[in-house]
Amino acid sequence: MREEIKVFSKKILIIAATAFFISFPGCQRQKGEIPPDTEAITISGLQKHMNVLTSDEMEGRLTGSSGYKIAADYAAEQFASFTLEPGWPDGNKKSFLQPVPFIHYRFGSNNALTIQRNGKTKEYTPGRKSYELLYPGEGNENIPLSSPVFIGYGIHEPELGWDDYAGLDVGGKIAILMMGFSPRNSDIQMPMKVRRKYSDRIKGDLLRFSAAIEKNAAAIIVIPDESFANNWDRIMSQRKRFNFVASQSYGPSSPGEPPIPVVVANRDLVGRVFDKKDFNPIEERGDYATFVMDGIELGLTVNASKEYFTCYNIIALLPGTDPKLDNEYIAVAAHLDHLGKNGFIIYRGANDDASGCSLILEVAQALAQNPAKRPVMFILFTAEEAGHYGSLHFLEYPPVPLEQIALNINIEQIGSKHRNVKGIWAIGPPSQRDLLYSAHQKVKSIDLNFDNIDSQLRVIQGSDTWSFYLQKVPAIILGSGGFPEHHTPGDTIDLIDFDHLYKATLLVYEYILELGNK
């Protein structure tokens, strides 16, 4: 795919034009409560962007799909029409598109998990009643039969008072571990420092996998918790659409693809494997222990190929008006990707996060006509849904030094009629509270609540804000809480409260001006 902005297909232009004329009647700005310098921000403009980004042509904007590329080109073309500058230095020229590399897996037909016990051998192929392959390792693996090692929660933290590997050698063997960790009211007394370190599931799983890899395990079998097991079909359907990973490491928070196979096993199958063992993690029978599983042998055959592809973050720059502040960027972001489609069913992601992208496009257009003293960088990330790879890549390869980003403003799920927050929920550094409320004085018709980011870490872990937080880049997230249609085909444009989204757009615009001119 070309990285420069390409000429749009006639079809997309028709979609945009039709959306504009359909939404125009009755959708003018509300007089009497709106600051006079925001004429460029309109409900009809928000509807135009939303109609395009959630259209059939976008196919749910899955990372790496043709629909995502069309959406990325649309956003880039809009930024260019506002006279914003391309934000990515691409050799001797600049581009609105920052390349982000990925690996896509294609699983062959010769995958099998072999179980041998009491001289009897049984082979299982991937499926809901056996196991599914999450990561293929090198792609073609033939791990011979040997006694597996049960490593419990797979946590190796001896300095924190917990080591599931104590006295065990997993070298060259299949390691079996449990997802999550014990409930606080269980008999397993895990130190609070360990619980806190592993409280983020993504980070916790990476730490567990890394420990098994360092101990030279041949493969990892994950025992799912009950929540995963009860939603197996939905999770695995989504997983098969997201069968890609970043092609490089982004540090401890995202080390790239595991070099050994990782599978998730059906709980009933695991229960049979642990039959007659002193501890059974499925039946929660016996005293917790880690051990070599004598009397049973497991083998694994993996057949998969890897394809490399490129997707894109979209980056646009609006220079400031004060040269003395050229190195103090305000970075405003949302994620453009969503879940794609499953067969003929499109996951349109209207609130998640076409609402944030549409807001940013309207704010960019208004600020282009009334720029602040400080420069503003607008970013639409890829692969947020797959593990925040787009924001991680941006922070690994920023177009400006990270110390020049004064603040990241992340817009996430801000427009649903069924939102569980009446107005706007802001989570950010305490230093931003007064500035945000000052901007709010100009848009009083929307409720605003503010929480210190350090008190809401579990909330931000599911967003690109977390990537900035881990890099110690000041960040604030603005949204309207959860909504019941999240990650379902029901997240459509009909779900959007455009009056609310319009007021949120005005608030973000005024907030950026407060930041940019203070």
Image (cartoon, helix red, strand yellow):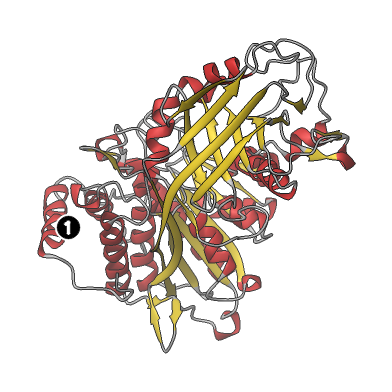
Q: Position of residue 52 (x, y in %)?
A: 22, 53
**Residue, x 43% and y 32% (percent of image)?**
235
Q: Foreground: 356 or 162?
A: 162
Question: With 189 as the anchor, is 364 left or right in this view?
Answer: left
* Most foreground residue, 94 or 121: 121
Evaluate whether residue 509 shows in this view: no
Q: Residues within 10 Å of mark 1 (few under 14, many from 20)?
A: some
Instruction: State the image coordinates of residue 277 (x, y, percent, origin top left).
Output: 71, 14
Asked whether 48 or 322 is in front, the reply is 48
Left or right of residue 21: residue 325: right
Percent x, y for residue 391?
A: 52, 59
Measuring 37% from the left and 64% from the top, which residue is drawn there?
Answer: 37
Q: Secondary structure at mark 1?
A: helix
Q: Is residue 328 above or below residue 252?
A: below
The foreground one among 291 and 327 is 291
Q: Quadrant of residue 115?
A: top right
Figure check: 18 above or below 228: below
The quarter of the rendered structure image containing the N terminus is bottom left
User: What residue do we see at 55% from left, 85% from top?
Assistant: 323
**How many marks on residues?**
1
**Which residue is most to the front?**
119
Q: Is residue 288 visible?
A: yes
Quarter holding the C terminus is: bottom right
Give percent across and percent down for residue 192: 81, 31
Q: Inspect the image, locate mark 1, and give the three-letter code of the amino acid beneath it.
A: Ala
Q: Residue at x 59, y 16 (%)?
A: 271
Residue furthest out toward the bottom = 92
**Residue that mark 1 sits on:** 16
- Left or right: residue 267 versus residue 216 is left
Q: Is residue 325 above or below residue 261?
A: below
